[in-house]
Amino acid sequence: MWRLLQILGAICLAIVLFADAAGAFHLFPSVGWGKPDSIGYYLDIVFGIFGSILIVVGLAGNGVARR
């Protein structure tokens, strides 16, 4: 279960990387990647925070489970 959380966190962070690349190359301009107050901006922040939390919880849970 803990490794699944880590994998889901890594997927969320990969989505953040895709969003940043999409903003740099102006892919999907209707989403407004990189512009404040756009859906792309909020997706980037939410997935970054959620992915980081999942990875930390997965690592902590895995460490506790090994004890």
Image (cartoon, rainbow, N blue to C red):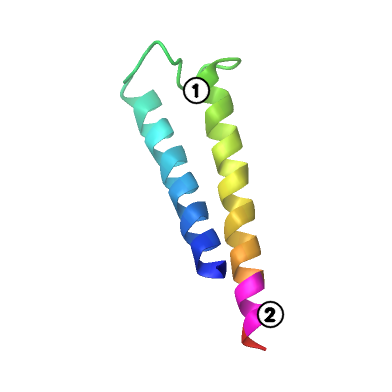
Label 1 element class: helix
Q: In which quarter of the image is residue 42?
A: top right
Q: Tell me the amino acid under the disc marked 2.
A: Val
* Left or right: 46, with 40 as reference point: right
Return the residue found at the far top: 30
Count of numbered tags: 2
Return the residue found at the far bottom: 67
Label 2 element class: helix
- Establish if 58 lies above or below 21: below
Q: In which quarter of the image is residue 59?
A: bottom right
Q: Which mark is residue 6?
A: none
C-alpha distance separating marks 1 and 2: 36 Å
The magenta region covers 61-65
State which mark lies toward you, 1 or 2.
2
x and y, in percent, of residue 61 in the image = 65, 72
Quarter of the image with the N terminus in it: bottom right
Residue 2 on the magenta segment: no
x and y, in percent, of residue 58 in the image = 60, 65
x and y, in percent, of residue 47 in the image = 55, 39
Quarter of the image with the C terminus in it: bottom right
x and y, in percent, of residue 45 in the image = 59, 34
Residue pictured at 61% horizontal, 45% vertical: 50
> Disc 1 designates what residue?
40
- Establish if 41 lies above or below 48: above
* Left or right: 49, with 24 as reference point: right
Q: Is the magenta stretch mostly helix, strand or loop?
A: helix
Circle nearer the N terminus (1, 2): 1
> Disc 2 designates what residue?
64
Q: Tell me the amino acid under the disc marked 1.
A: Gly
Residue pictured at 41% horizontal, 46% vertical: 14
- Establish if 14 lies above or below 65: above
| Mark 1 Cα shell of 10 Å, populated few (<14), some (14-19), many (≥20) | many
